[in-house]
């Protein structure tokens, strides 16, 4: 890419769509580490707000614990504020947002106002695999690192490799809550994929593979989008 191109290239907004357990969190963390792009995970921001007992956290906790989505107005405000931070100037990556068509329309306006370009990926994973992944997922309430009891266990069982805290199961990864989350996904988030398919390319990623194989494909697609 030449210097002139670099000056005219619009900042990118990467969207990682897909059901809970599809690997969006894992892949977005790798992308952020490798490329330095700012990663915004709305689920992590909400869990952090719950831990800090902020007004947002107090509102979100009962909804999340039952597998429901948090109201659009709260999420749209959260994103609008987050993207004004300095690390988002040259682009950002969203994990877990937008989850409704209403959120997608707000994001479309934000992206247009900032002169950004969207790059959309959709992670596809069979339902039986999602259920296995979510039921075996373990989470560190201190640093939000995630593990899986079979596929990516912590070095010391039940203890976070990164900060030494005790790992737990996320309250919304319990079996009955997972079923509700998948219902919410089908009803409210699948239409978001259709929303973007009408506007431009949505790259389908087969998420039922090794983390490294999935990342190799993601990297190839992103490199193309960034060049
Ligand atoms: P995640 O960590 O992305 O699986 O999100 C966990 C939970 O946070 C979801 O089940 C929702 O209750 C809530 N949440 C995260 N992102 C959003 C969003 N964009 N809109 C509404 N609720 C959200």
Image (cartoon, rainbow, N blue to C red):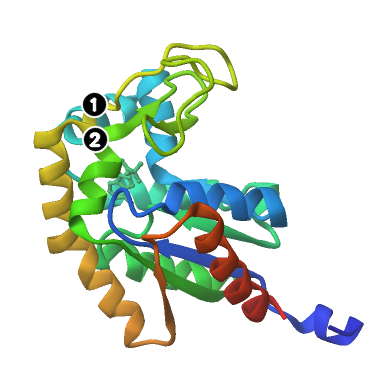
Q: Which mark is residue 97?
A: none
Label 2 CB less than 8 angstroms from ligand 1? no
Q: Quadrant of the C terminus?
A: bottom right
Q: Position of residue 126 (x, y in %)?
A: 23, 61
Q: CA distance from mark 2 to mark 1?
A: 11 Å
Of circles 2 and 1, which is in front? 2
| Residue at image point 36% right, 29% down | 149
Q: Are marks 2 and 1 in contact (CB under 8 Å)?
A: no
| Residue 71 versus residue 160 in the image, above or below | below
**Disc 2: which residue:** 135
| Residue at image point 35% right, 79% down | 196
Local packing at callout 2 (Cα closer than 10 Å; few below 14, some 14-19, many 20+) is some
32 or 106: nearer the viewer: 32
| Residue 38 versus residue 54 in the image, above or below | below
Q: Position of residue 106 (x, y in %)?
A: 37, 65
For residue 195, side relative to residue 30 (left or right):
left
**Disc 1: which residue:** 171
């Amino acid at each position: 890419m030449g210097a002139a191109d670099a000056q005219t290239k619009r900042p990118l907004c990467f969207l990682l769509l897909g059901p809970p357990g599809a690997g969006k969190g894992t892949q977005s963390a790798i992308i952020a580490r490798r490329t330095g792009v700012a990663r915004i995970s709305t689920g992590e921001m909400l869990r952090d707000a719950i831990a800090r007992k902020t007004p947002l956290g107090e509102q979100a906790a009962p909804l999340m614990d039952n597998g429901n989505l948090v109201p659009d107005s709260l999420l749209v405000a959260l994103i609008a504020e987050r993207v004004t931070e300095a690390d988002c100037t040259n682009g950002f990556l969203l994990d877990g947002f937008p989850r409704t068509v209403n959120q997608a329309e707000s994001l479309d306006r934000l992206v247009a106002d900032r002169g950004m370009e969207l790059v959309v990926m959709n992670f596809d994973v069979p339902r039986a695999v999602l259920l296995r992944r979510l039921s075996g997922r373990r989470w560190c309430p201190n640093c939000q690192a995630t593990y899986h009891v079979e596929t990516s266990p912590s070095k010391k069982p039940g203890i976070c490799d990164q900060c030494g805290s005790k790992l737990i199961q996320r309250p919304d990864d319990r079996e009955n809550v997972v079923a509700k989350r998948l219902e919410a996904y089908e009803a409210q988030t699948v239409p978001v994929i259709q929303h973007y398919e009408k506007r431009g390319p949505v790259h389908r990623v087969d998420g039922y593979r090794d983390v490294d194989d999935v990342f190799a494909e993601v990297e190839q697609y992103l490199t193309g989008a960034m060049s």
